[in-house]
């Protein structure tokens, strides 16, 4: 059985699951929508991040517009606005499948694609380095007293910016060295729960996909940007659950629902 076929079977109808398992079914089997496939790629494909998902969703919308309306949305797109991202996503997916761009495109187009990817990567690196240098220069140009006040305010702003349930932690800013910057991302693994006194602890490892400093204003919107910033590509947070809270929950669940 192809695990990819099983993963992409639409779970709304059991016949789709049967078909993915190689069993005879009734009717025409359906997969999940393409948007859902891209969401699953976030979890299972190394290197596929939120910026790639958004790009794929965008291309999918353009394709649907062309297919269902007769319009030609791709006619208004310049190659430099999408081709590099397209090859990047293809390269990531090919590597996940133990393939190369050459297997998919042929040697000549694959060589051109690799040259474009190299240029795009170097351009992104230079862009990140410039952004860090500019924010450092502007921040260092402020009076010392103002910098100290900004640092104090940034700690509060970082705390407010954290959304409950989001996976994030504090990090040092590569531009102004503030220790109150925020790096956020998605979970890639979780440790086995263990006890510490009256608490259950779990260590959650996240992939860094977004960075923001509330002192100098530096923002890095994707894992690709963070790669060139010096910010750690992964981070770990500890999730704590109180045994007392669990006992209270069990009590109310049992006795307050009668």
Image: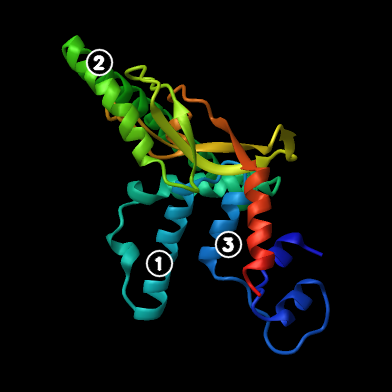
The image shows residue 27, relative to residue 45, as above or below, that is below
- Residue that mark 3 sits on: 37
Q: Residue at 78% of width from left, 77% of height from top?
A: 18
Query: Is residue 107 at least partly visible in the picture?
Result: no
Tell me the quarter of the image containing the N terminus: bottom right
Q: Which mark is residue 148?
A: 2
Which quadrant holds residue 138?
A: top left
- Numbered tag placed on residue 50 in the rendering: none
Query: Mark 3, mark 1: which one is toward the viewer?
Result: 3
Packing grade of label 2 (10 A; few <14, some 14-19, many >=20) is few
Nearer to us of marks 2 and 1 is 2
In the image, what residue occupies the spot 40% across and 67% down? 61
Q: Which colour scheme is used?
A: rainbow
199 or 104, which lies in front? 199
Check the image and report above or below for 165 versus 75: above
Secondary structure of the residue carrying numbered label 2: helix
* Crowding near the residue tagged with mark 3, few <14, some 14–19, many ≥20 C-alpha atoms within 10 Å: some
Compared with 14, 52 (above or below) is above
Tally of numbered tags: 3
What residue is drawn where x is 54% and y is 57%?
39
* Residue linked to disc 1: 61
Please indicate whether residue 236 sits to the left or right of residue 13 in the image. left
């Amino acid at each position: 059985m192809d695990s990819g076929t099983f993963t992409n079977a639409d779970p709304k109808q059991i016949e789709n699951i049967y078909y993915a398992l190689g069993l005879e079914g009734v009717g025409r089997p359906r997969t999940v929508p393409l948007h859902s496939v891209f969401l699953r790629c976030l979890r299972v494909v190394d290197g596929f991040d939120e910026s790639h998902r958004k790009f794929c969703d965008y291309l999918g919308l353009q394709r649907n517009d062309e297919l269902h309306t007769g319009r030609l949305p791709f006619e208004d797109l310049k190659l430099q606005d999408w081709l590099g991202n397209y090859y990047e996503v293809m390269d990531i997916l090919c590597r996940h499948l133990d393939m190369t761009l050459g297997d998919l495109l042929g040697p000549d187009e694959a060589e051109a694609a690799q040259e474009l990817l190299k240029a795009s990567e170097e351009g992104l690196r230079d862009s990140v380095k410039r952004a860090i240098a500019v924010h450092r220069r502007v921040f260092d140009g402020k009076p010392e007293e103002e910098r100290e006040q900004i640092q104090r305010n940034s700690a509060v702003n970082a705390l407010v910016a954290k959304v409950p349930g989001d996976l994030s932690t504090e990090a040092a800013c590569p531009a102004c060295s503030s220790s109150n910057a925020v790096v956020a991302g998605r979970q890639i693994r979780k440790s086995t729960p263990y006890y510490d006194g009256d608490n259950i602890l779990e260590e959650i490892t996240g992939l860094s996909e977004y960075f923001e400093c509330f002192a100098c204003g530096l923002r890095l919107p994707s894992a690709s940007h963070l790669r060139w910033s010096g910010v750690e590509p992964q981070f770990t947070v500890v999730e704590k659950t109180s045994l007392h809270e669990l006992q209270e929950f069990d009590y109310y669940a049992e006795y307050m629902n009668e």
